[in-house]
Each structure stands twice: as C-alpha cells, then as structure tokens.
Image: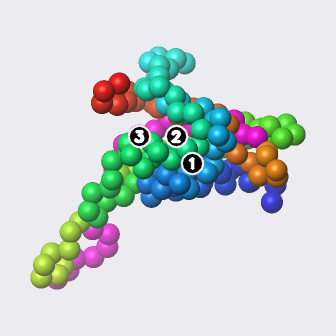
Amino acid sequence: MSDERKIQEILARYVRATDRRDGRTQGALFTDDAVVQSLSKTGPDSYEPVAPPLVGGAAVAYAVDNYMAPHPEGGSSHHVTTDHIIEVDGDQAHMNAQFIVFRVQGAARPANGWPAGTFGAQGTVQPIESGYYDTDLRRIDGEWKIVGHRILLDLPYVVPGV
C-alpha cells in the first residue's frame, strides 16, 4: 500500500472512531506530543480557537470518551471526508481533507410494527458540521501517526464553559 493510501486510512480510522465515540482507538492514532486544535471560521481565511488545544493521544482519547455527547437512542453520526490532498516528504507528511458530518436518527419502530405500505429507510439524515481537517503526520517505527491536527470548522462552534 502506498504511503498516501496509508495516510488517508489514518483519517478514515479517525472519523470512524469519532462516529463510534471510541476514544481509545482514536487516541492511538496520535503521538504522545501531538497537538489537536479546533478552530471556527471568522472570515474568508481566518479562524479562532474553539477551546484550548489537546496535547497527546491520551488527551484525545479522554476528550472523545468524556466530552462528546453520546448518540441518542437510534441515533448516530456519519463523517464523510473528500478531496484528500496528501504530501509525503520522507517520514513527514501533510494531509488536508474536506469533511461533512451528518446526524443520523432512525425512526422508532411502532409497537405494533410498521404500518402497511411502509417502505425504505425510516428516519432522518441531516448535515450538521463541515470544514477541513489539516493534519501533520510522522512515520514512527514504520507506522504513520498524527503529530498535529487542526479541525477547521466552517460554522461557529460553542463549547460550554470555554
């Protein structure tokens, strides 16, 4: 597998761990000194921090496990990433990818079953976030790890207490 594909797979594992609220898996993608920063767009090419940065994979794992709201009954999220731009220079790499996050909410099955004539998916899918992941990686002992990760949000983002 090419380095570019391995790097793209790191982001695929990252978003799947986010959707599953799996801090252990997501944290393992980062180095112990990785810096993760979420930023909200304030102008055409400007951003401001949403919260203080997270440092290290353990902090990322803790944040996923303790700060992300659990999905409601029948609900989930689904991240889609596109247009990955990947540059590899030896054991260093940079990736920039667009993302959209969808909120998925399945309809509750009626106690007496679905009415006659009901067909297809029951529920809603709604886009709730978009932006870019801007990520620096380093190859360590043959494995790519995230050393810097900036989540560049297109919309204002509020973190209570920050």
| Mark count | 3
Residue at the far right: name it. 90
Query: As displayed, is residue 23 above or below residue 136?
Result: below
Residue at (70, 45) in percent of width and height: 145
Q: Which quarter of the rendered picture does the N terminus lie within? A: bottom right
Q: Secondary structure at mark 2?
A: helix
Residue, disc 3: 129
Please name the amino acid that badge 1 sits on. Gly
Q: Amino acid at mark 2?
A: Ala
Image location (x, y in percent) of residue 130: 46, 38
Circle 1 residue: 27
Which residue is more in the foreground, 1 or 32? 32
Residues at marks 3 and 1, CA–CA distance in whole angstroms? 21 Å
From the image, tell me which residue sits under label 2: 59
Asked whether 38 or 140 is in front, the reply is: 140
Q: Nearer the viewer, mark 3 or mark 2?
A: 2
Figure quadrant of residue 74:
bottom left
Q: Quadrant of residue 125?
A: bottom left
Residue located 52% across and 33% down the image: 54
